[in-house]
Image: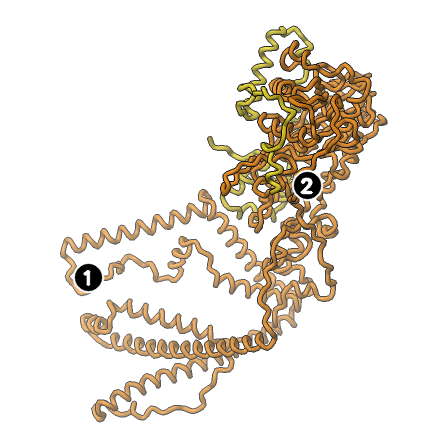
Amino acid sequence: MTSTPYSQLRSRGDTPVLPPPLVYKIRDAQPTLEPEPVTHGWKAGLPIAIDLGSYQTRIGYTSSDLPSHIFPTLSSKLRDRKISKTYHLVGNDIYLDNAARQTARSPFDGNILANWDLVENILDYSFSKIDVQSIDRVDNPIVINEAVGSLFSQRKNLQELLYECYNVPSASVGIDSMFSFYKNGGRNGLVISSGHEASYVIPVYNGKGIFSKSKRIDWGGHQSSQFMMDLLGMKYPTFPSKLNQAQSTFLVQDHCYMSTDYKEELNHFLDFDGLETRERVVEAPYTEVVANQKSEEELAKIAERRKESGKRLQEQAAKMRSEKLAQKESELIYYKELKERVAELLTKRDQQHLLETEGFDDERALLRTINDLEKSIKRSRKDDDGDENESVEVEVPTFPLLDIDDSELDAEQIKAKRHQKLLKANWEARQRFNEEKKLEKLKKQEEERKEKEWREDNLSSWIEDKRGKLNNLLQKKRDRQKLKEELSNRKSLASQMRMKSIASLAAETKGSKRRRANGGGSGSGGSAGSSANGATGDVDPDDTFGADDGDWSIYRDIVNVIDSEAEEEERQEIEMLENSLLEFDPDFSIEDTLEAEMDWRKSTIHMFLRGPREFDPLSQAHSYRMHLNVERIRVPEVLFQPTIAGIDQAGITEVSRMILLERLNADTRSSISKKIFLTGGQTLFPQFDQRVRSEFTSILPTGAEFNVTRANDPLLDAWKGMAKWANAEESKDSFLTKSEWHEMGPDYIKEHQFTVQ
Amino acid sequence: MSLVNADLSRINKCFKSPSWKPSAASRRNKNAKALLAEEQKVLAERQQQNGSSNKNFMDAANYFNLEAPPSLVPRKWYCDITGLEGKYRSVGSGLRYHDKEVYAVIKTLAPGVDQQYLELRHANVILR
């Protein structure tokens, strides 16, 4: 009966050849070749809008529809050691140089502006890119954003920079998400703004933000991409290339989406069916290693050579094995004779003398040697068992010299006789061996016959027996696994038992040593037996260790290694049982085999790590692939369940519910809850609005009408709103002039509809 | 060459005030933690100035009272390894897991990896 691998059985017929999977390349920030161009068109008095965000900075004259420059809020100081020059690169220019990208720093620490040197760099860069031409001053009103609840020191530093460093005539500060709402024509509504470093929920009434009732959740795009990076790092700890922050950000942007029903979707995300459409396979860039292609002829030659040398080696090994076996057999015979000879001797002293001349300490040592030999012969015969083409010697060799007495032979002949004696023993051993093999074969046939009879007689009892045996083996396997696990825990019972055995073994050795030392000291033992005792040290009349073969297993137990040979044997036995059950037991299907149980198709972990296809560990392409599945919804979900990422804050839904139902009075609530407005980069996740809709349906009174709208452009609408507002009549009185600033002192601002307090 | 053209220190910045010198206080590099501590001090001072009776000031949004409060709904647990529903908790490490297959993986994790998984949700043990 040949064993067929489970995968082959399974794939027979029912698995069509799969098309190659859809693999996405992991995007990375692209290097640029030229510095950021300069935009002309400066005019004195033309307001400039600056959206200084923690992700990107957008800047431009309010006369245009779009910001003329959009760049990451990063600044990099790069030192070229070769020519000892330092470059200050800002914004998009950091992509000119790989090293600059690596050392780029953000002025933000979390959502707080912390490094004002970098802020100054970024403003310098901004004003130079829009080609401000006034001398010693930026002769334009400025509209700039700040975060809700930004620090007093931040406002102070920003004003100092604007009025002292750039000498701006007037400036106004506002909340970016308010400008975005304004741009989208909102008057009343709940603004959910999810940016790069934090997310905000802000109720707006009559166009004015109610900031005292607003809340911030400390989770944004930056945290998302960091979370994604950490998750993938844990998922693929041996991934050959390292993911950088930019790549991780792109992964989040390109492949994540908001689940509309997280619990339900999660329950079936890793199901085999349809996983291919749910998951995204992404591939890191790598250079393919092409193995040297050899021609068919060469390959055939190599195979031939290998086969030949293998054959030769096999032959040599077989020859050596049989020689060794023969030697062992003759030794065994010799020692058996010796045993008889010893038994014939009458006095103990003579016996001992004979044993010692033969190199044994006492009779037990001899017995042990015989025992060992018998065992090893048995073992090597078992190995040779499969060797069917063992030639059977038909011819009986003759050994003429053996029948002649030594006295009639000269020295030469005596030597020859000794040789013949060995040969004879060898031959006899072989005969015996063949005999035994035949017997074994007969026995096997007999067994098979019996099995068959049994099966035909009483199939159910046969099946019962086989299943019982199989279950026993499987149980043993499980037990061993369990023991292994327990041993890895220092405090487990199994580990403690092991330590106990070690301790007791150590104690025994010590005890016997002491006893021996005492015996020598008293000088009472003068017999040959006692001297032998002293020489070997392991013969103690009370010590029966080793009399039973099982005693030795204690060493196996304490050494704590897996017996791979025994395991392999067991595995074969299981396979054999399974195969016969497969053949004759109608209730035992391929699905019940051990191999089927271990099949990757059933493994959630495999689905999680490698998707719905087989993984080839040798394939370079496979090892450079990551499978995004649960992560696709897990990362955005943090906004609704911050505890997923260990943030001890309520999610968007709960915060909104609290604001709407507990902190606002009924009148304002009813007008605010009619419009839910989404802005900020994180709300770009697909289905974000659907999710918000379903969440708000659950928290608002039944039948309450509301609509959820996303900003036209969640990233740029803040800037556009600033530009629109700066040109509108309503902003006329909202700019704080330099002289007013001098008068009112630091961190005073002119209140308007988009400012805090 | 393009690096030289892009270098900010070489770019003409005629719009800057020549007499500009940042005040020392604004340029001392402080991290967010230090800045927040400072802010708390400022807030306390102003509160004293305005008197605690000034309701307006107490109600105004600041960095600290803006923070979303902890959630009050029962927390849902997710498998730390796969992200699936995590009904069970491993006794030894405290990791959440989805089923027995994931548990088998948890048991074979190298020492320290369980803490790395816990760190993803800030539940790791921090030794000080």
What amino acid is at disc 2? Answer: Val
Whether residue A591 sits left or right of residue A419 in the image: it is right
Whole-percent x and y of residue A344? 24, 77
Residue appearing at x 73%, y 42% in the figure: A265
> Given this view, does label 1 or label 2 mark the residue nearer the observer?
2
Q: Which chain is orange?
A: A
Q: Which chain is yellow?
A: B
Q: Is residue A217 visible?
A: yes
Q: Tell which subunit mark 1 falls on.
A: A
Q: Tell which subunit mark 2 falls on.
A: A
Q: Closer to the camera, A708 or A43?
A: A43
Residue appearing at x 68%, y 35% in the figure: A71
Cβ–Cβ under 8 Å for marks 1 and 2: no
Q: What is the secondary structure assignment of the residue under circle 1? A: helix
Residue appearing at x 72%, y 22% in the figure: A140
Q: Which residue is mark 1?
A: A530
Whole-percent x and y of residue A341? 26, 77
Q: Closer to the camera, A102 or A132?
A: A132
Q: Which mark is residue A409?
A: none
To the question of a shared chain for discs 1 and 2, the answer is yes
Q: Is residue B74 visible?
A: no
Count of numbered circles in the view: 2
Neighbor class of circle 2 (other Cα within 10 Å; few <14, some 14-19, many 20+) is many
Whether residue A554 sits left or right of residue B67 in the image: it is left
Q: Which residue is mark 2?
A: A252
What amino acid is at disc 1? Answer: Ser
Whole-percent x and y of residue A120? 61, 26
Q: Quadrant of the N terminus of chain A?
A: bottom right
